[in-house]
Image (spheres, helix red, strand yellow):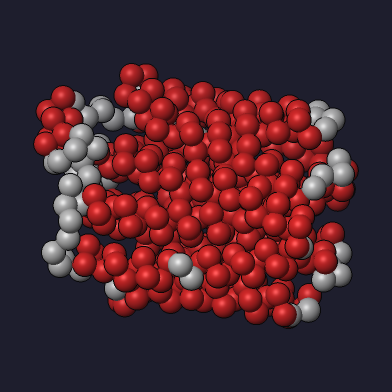
Amino acid sequence: MIPQRARATLAASCIIHFLHDGCSDLLYVLFPVWARGFSLSFAQVGLLRTGYSGALALFQIPAGYLADRWGEPRILAAGTFLTAVGFLCIGTAEGFVPLLLYLMIAGLGSGTQHPLSSSLVSRAYEAGGRRVAIATYNFSGDLGKVTWPACVAFVTAWAGWRWAAQGIGLVVLATAVGIFFLLTSLAGVPAGPQATSAADRAGNGWGIRNAWGFSLLSTIHAIDNGSRTVFLTYLPFLLLGKGARMDLMWLALGVTFAGGATGKFVCGHLAERWGIIRTVLVTEIATGLGILLLLALPVTPALFLLPILGIALNGTSSVLYGTVAEMVAPERHSRVYGLFYTIGIGTGALAPPLFGLLSDASGVPVTLAVLAAVILVTLPLAHLLRPAVEGKPVHNS
């Protein structure tokens, strides 16, 4: 693939990532609005998060198999179209059950994005520059997390949440059509049977060269992603409990997401300098202690803490994503990334309603204190992972 086509593929994938990650995280702005409008409990709010994230997680591996048959552009366009339909329907929801159903439809469509876009970018940059391209692709998702919640908060305050949801649906629908024609003209040729056989010979059909290391890495990822989802789901309720106004929610989430985008960039460089394990230890300790400090602060100092907390909250993930490829045969990167994303996002889908039950029983501050303790479980796991990432003897598959 010539460089110009590679750049075009990266640009298209970044647009898709920008949209889908934005659609996922703009929900954090709407949860308090829906909770008040539909008189929802914290557990029900958690189930709404689960509906979207769970459908997204469950469809990632099937999306990879469908792409093997029909090609990434078609499945990506179809998934983006389904997400658009989901948001258009969300704007008509009149209660908890239809809202949950429409969120599941939208999440199902977004399940195509991570594994297939990653595969397209990886293939486009086989000749070189893949690490920078993947980093650019990941950063575009964080830009969506900053942009779309702010836009939705503004439109919701001006015209109501229904107009905001349907406006998002129209933008995603138009993008689905454009992306289909662009990617169809740019997509490369899928890996053939020879590459598949090579991946199968790597050890277990998935191409995972180090099952023990991959299991530890996935467990840390699951705790990290689940904790981040729980924190973002209940952060607005914590701030409201401190006396913050509803119109400050977009600002609070915006600065947190901006910190997260910075964390993706900064922690990737720190991992090169400090090493993977040390970076994970620093980010996880900072996340746990930052949440505990946030509980003790009044609203204004809390807003200043949130971007710093966002750096630690999101920084771990960039380190983990880059480590997956080192444990997997190149021919199986897209499929194993689908598995890795499914594990993390699946945990992120299951955790909010469980912590929502705790919030209903004991309050949001107690829930976030428990969450901070759970995050610290990653510290011994990171220590166990050290041999796998530093070249010492490990349990191989």
Question: In percent of the image, x 48 and y 70: which residue is there?
Answer: 376
Of residues 230 and 244, the one nearer the viewer is 230
Q: Is residue 149 visible?
A: no
Answer left or right for 201 relative to 285: left
Q: Is residue 179 visible?
A: yes
Of residues 105 and 20, the one nearer the viewer is 105
In the displayed structure, 184 sits above or below 380; it is above
Question: In percent of the image, x 30 and y 76: which residue is there?
Answer: 273
Image quarter where the N terminus lies is: top left
Residue 263 in the image, given as x and y percentages of width and height: 49, 67
Question: In percent of the image, x 51 and y 63: which residue is there?
Answer: 314
Residue 188 in the image, given as x and y percentages of width and height: 28, 30
Question: In percent of the image, x 70 and y 75: which residue is there?
Answer: 295
Answer left or right for 257 relative to 300: left
Residue 168 in the image, given as x and y percentages of width and height: 69, 37
Of residues 247 and 40, the one nearer the viewer is 40
Which of the 4 quarters of the picture holds residue 92? Answer: top right
